Image: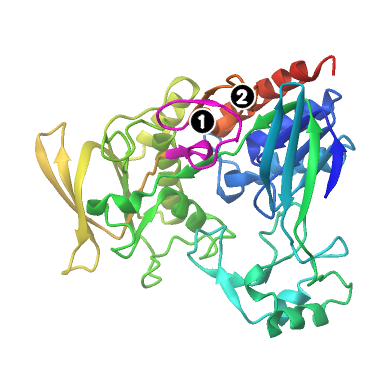
Amino acid sequence: MSDERKNILVVGGGISGMTAAVEAAEAGAEVVLVEKNPYLGGRVTSLNQYFPKLCPPQCGLEINFRRIKNNPKISFHTLTEVESITGGPGNYQVTVLVNPRYVNDNCTACGKCGDACEAEIPNQLNYGMDKVKAAYLPHAMAFPFKYVLAPEIIGTADAQKCAQACVYKAIDLEMQPAKITYDVGAIIWATGWDPYEVEKVDYLGLGKIPNVLTSLMFERLAAHNGPSGGKILRPSDGREVKSIAFVQCAGSRDENHLAYCSGICCLASLKQATYIREKVPESRAHIYYIDVRAMGKYEDFYTRVDQDENIILTKSKIARISEDPESGGILVEGEDIGKGAKIKQVVDMVVLAVGMVPGTAKVKPELEMECDDFGFATAPGTSGIIPAGCVKAPMEVAASVQDATAAALKAIHGTMGR
């Protein structure tokens, strides 16, 4: 246990948390950033491309990583969670638990430990669609650029093999959890979002029908460092996908599941339709939507995608997804609202556009934070903890960056006079 004094604590190392940290630090504040994953970057790390420019996320992430690395006013911990918060605005005491990585700062990411390791674990970055060695680099752009040993192998022969293979003495199998208490003036809560558990919607078939994926899984499938090397292949048989159905509002706008609209799912599916069209020129993409939300600066993006004659947008609520025994494909059934006719479309793959559930729906600060009925943090409340990014509302990357900058300003104001 150790104690440190900082101006601001940022909880969550995704795009919102990193932005809040660097903006506050570059304005002169002492900042500590904590993240539960073994790397910074959050869900943006798993994206193939941003919309509307369709550029890879590595550019924006690398700039933020460099700003963090080069700024002595920022310290950060990965594999770290908040244990307790006491005090109040201007004078918080926060205890965090830093879980062991079993790899120290001697690591050069040479990969020898991974070569020696035989055990495999589900690949978190790829949503379990493939496996990685239990001694692994989280991804090619990981920050910090260090390997991790999965706790499952500690105490096994595999862990010993990893330690013996490392010539830099970077493997520390005796590493223990560590508690640190920070004395801070302000806390920014930027714990991001989780996808809605769409398995609960029985008629959509996720987990039951092969080749029905979520939009997050499809994003990884299209990525060059994804489970299929960027080729859009059916997980069931490795066959190239030539027809695909994007089903919007998968569980969203449904009082039995997720009653609200996340707003960005339409744009995500429009973007993903461009993936299949670019990678498989003879492919067809069907987008079944209730309403298309592509407002303001994103309307041009919608118009551009809609001009592709092989991307078919149909106003519809899909009622059933099942296996088609004749073709081996997937049968999508619903109603074409515009034509007043039934839809029966067989495709190679179905992608379910899942809604955003705030991190505060599962893990809230111990001190009071005002949240709406869905768990989104609507205001700091009496505790003064400042929410940022997708814990406040569903947001795309650009809006998250803007909101995090505002949170940094509020936090700096909260520490003035300390």
Where is residue 182? Give x, y as percent: 80, 38
Where is residue 351? Give x, y as percent: 36, 51
* Front-most of residues 381 and 103: 381
Q: Are marks 2 and 1 in contact (CB under 8 Å)?
A: yes
For label 2, the SS is: helix
Q: Residue at coordinates 46% horizontally, 32% vertically from top-left?
A: 375
Where residue 395 is drawn, which disc sits there?
1
Q: Is residue 259 left or right of residue 273?
A: left
* Amino acid tagged 1: Met
Q: CA distance from mark 2 to mark 1?
A: 9 Å
Q: Residue 372 lies in magenta, yes or no?
A: yes
Quadrant location of the C terminus in the rendered image: top right
Residue at the farthest front position:
86
* Front-most of residues 326 and 366: 366
Q: Earlier in the sequence, mark 2 or mark 1?
A: 1
Q: Quadrant of residue 235?
A: bottom left
The residue labelled by disc 2 is 403
Q: Residue at coordinates 36% horizontally, 70% vertically from top-left?
A: 236
Q: Is residue 26 above or below residue 154?
A: above
* Front-most of residues 244 and 34: 34
Q: Is residue 102 left or right of residue 129?
A: right
Where is residue 286? Give x, y as percent: 29, 46
Please state the extent of the stretch shown in magenta in the rendering.
356-375
* Amino acid tagged 2: Asp
The reply to whether residue 49 is visible in this rendering is yes
